[in-house]
Image (cartoon, rainbow, N blue to C red):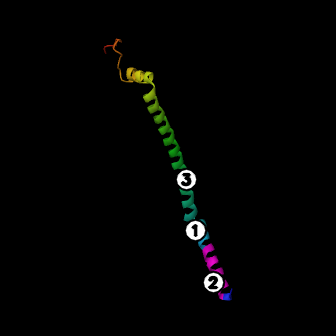
Amino acid sequence: MGRIEKFGLYLTLFLMGLFLVFIFFSTHGIQDFRQLNRQKASVSAQIDIVKQENQRIENQILRLKQDIEYVRHLAKHEQGMAAPDELIFKQKNK
């Protein structure tokens, strides 16, 4: 390798190193990096919450499909329905 080629290589490496230092250690570089890490953590937490909610809903769907007693319970207590042989007593408002 000639002197000029070595000089060009060293100059290129120096400029690349200087550029990397500028990117990572400039005021906005570190601030932006930290802000992105905080946003990533926040989004990850939101994803975990949504995954838990999806699992709860999937479990409820499965129970609605397979558990007739659960469906009867929901119909009776949440919808105010009754079986054909049941009587419903309601209080009058005063």
Residue at 57% across, 57% down: 34
Query: Foreground mark, 3 or 2?
Result: 2
Question: Camera-side residue: 1 or 20?
Answer: 1
Question: Camera-side residue: 53 or 61?
Answer: 61
Residue at 61% across, 74% down: 16
**What crowding class fits label 2: few (fewer than 14 Cα within 10 Å), some (14-19), or many (20 or more)?**
few
What amino acid is found at the position of numbered circle 3 in the picture?
A: Arg
**What crowding class fits label 3: few (fewer than 14 Cα within 10 Å), some (14-19), or many (20 or more)?**
few
Bounds of the magenta span? 4-17
Residue at mark 3: 38
Measured Cα–Cα span from mark 1 to mark 2: 22 Å
Query: SS class of the residue under badge 2?
Result: helix
Specify the quadrant that holds the N terminus.
bottom right
Quadrant hosting residue 4: bottom right
Is 16 left, or right, of 62 in this rendering? right
Residue at mark 2: 8
74 falls in the magenta region: no
Measured Cα–Cα span from mark 1 to mark 3: 19 Å
Measured Cα–Cα span from mark 3 to mark 2: 40 Å
**What crowding class fits label 1: few (fewer than 14 Cα within 10 Å), some (14-19), or many (20 or more)?**
few
Give the x, y percent position of residue 39. Answer: 52, 53
What amino acid is found at the position of numbered circle 2 in the picture?
A: Gly
Query: SS class of the residue under badge 1?
Result: helix
6 falls in the magenta region: yes
- Between discs 1 and 3, the one toward the N terminus: 1
